[in-house]
Amino acid sequence: MSKLPISLPPYETYNMIPQERTQTFKQWFASPINHNNYKHGEQSSVAHGTYIRYFYDNIRQILKTNHMNIKNEKEFRKEITTFIYRLSDENKECPP
Amino acid sequence: MPSIKKKYIQPENHDDSDIESDTEIVKILKTKFELDDYLKCEETREILEEQWLIKFYKQCEKDLWDFYEEEQKEQHANSSSILHYDKYNSYAGHLSSLVFEYIEPQYDLQIFYDYPELAQPLIDTFEDKARLEEEERKRLIRENYEKNVKHKGKTFNWATKSYK
């Protein structure tokens, strides 16, 4: 994988029909996470991209703790990003 | 060159000399072969790769699964757009194999020193190579002799002490 895609369909998962993408990857990355905050009824201010960074840092920390080194960090980050992206939905409240 | 193979192949009724022989083999394995040699030989490479996979799973797969599971549960509980398509935590294995692909392998040769019989295919390859090299050396000597020797094709007459 050399470049992140403009848009990719979600993984086809059991018992779920994936919704067609309406946003580009870039738009999705910058958009806030759709998050039901029942207590405050507010829209999340955390972007999908911020979550990916958090997720990636955690994976890296797990590997560091176990004394393992990443071979190609740039490619690895892209793969993790694609993995999260393809498992995630768009925030419908944020039109493209 | 003494044959490693002959030394290595043990009779069925093992005795104390087996331990001695094993130590000798381990010494040969340590001095004659490097990691690259083990990786070039298909059988030993497979063992190393399998051991590395086991080490990875033992060492950090659980941490990866726990982290992913926790994230998936939290996102699912909040009906989040993140990990929306993984309702049943079915992608932890996918993540784990993705991570495995991008980790520098840590091959450990210790298994061959503990169980030298596992390195037998490598030893065989080494012996075959040594035999081929020896054959090639002899062939070159023969060829060189044929080319350069003065009395080629002549027989030595002992009565006259000359070549005919």
Image (spheres, coloured by chain):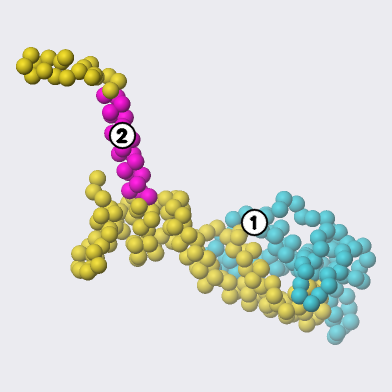
Q: Magenta span covers which residues?
A: B125-145
Residue B96 painted magenta? no
Residue type at mark 1 is Glu
- Seen at 28% across and 33% down, the residue is B138
Above-or-below relation of B29 to B17: above
Left or right: where does residue A30 sit relative to residue B11? right
Q: Position of residue B71 (x, y in %)?
A: 71, 76
Q: Horizontal and vertical percent for residue B158?
A: 8, 19
Q: Is residue A39 above or below residue B145?
A: below
SS at mark 1?
helix
Amino acid on which disc 2 is placed: Arg
Q: Which chain is yellow?
A: B
The residue depicted at 38 percent of the width and 50 percent of the height is: B125
- Residue B128 part of the magenta segment: yes
The chain letter of the cyan chain reads A
The quarter of the displayed image where residue B62 is located: bottom right
